[in-house]
Amino acid sequence: MSNWHSDKIESMKSKCDSSLRYIIKDCMEAAKAAQNLGNEAAEGRYLDELHYASMELAKRLKGEKPGG
């Protein structure tokens, strides 16, 4: 069974490094905006996406294959 989290993790595997870096930056800004608005659900979702992009980029920087 698929869910948002597993789908996001899987989608990060096909992104290029520059896209992952952009996602990290964009999600950080969006999470801060959501926090300022008091929208905890949105903030959490942006932080989750930021984390998944960071995990994939870290794998690559350690020399593992994308998606690996």
Image (cartoon, rainbow, N blue to C red):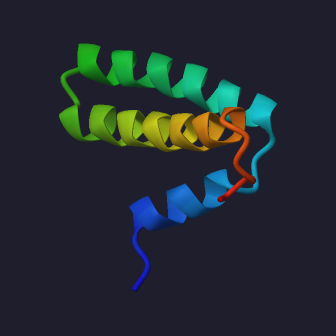
Of the pair 5 and 57, the residue shown nearer to us: 57
Where is residue 37 shown, x and y percent of the image?
Answer: 25, 19
Where is residue 36 shown, x and y percent of the image?
Answer: 26, 13
* Residue 59, picture quadrant: top right
Where is residue 18 shown, x and y percent of the image?
Answer: 79, 29
Is residue 39 positioned above or below 29 on the image? below
Q: How many marks?
A: 0
Residue lying farthest to the front in this orientation? 63
Q: Residue at x 35, y 42 (%)?
A: 45
Q: Residue at x 31, y 31 (%)?
A: 43
Where is residue 9 shown, x and y percent of the image?
Answer: 53, 57
Q: Residue at x 38, y 24 (%)?
A: 31
Taking 31 as reference, is 20 left or right? Answer: right
Residue lying farthest to the bottom in this orientation? 1
* Residue 68, picture quadrant: bottom right
Q: Residue at x 45, y 66 (%)?
A: 6
The N terminus sits in image quarter: bottom left
Taking 20 as reference, is 27 left or right? Answer: left
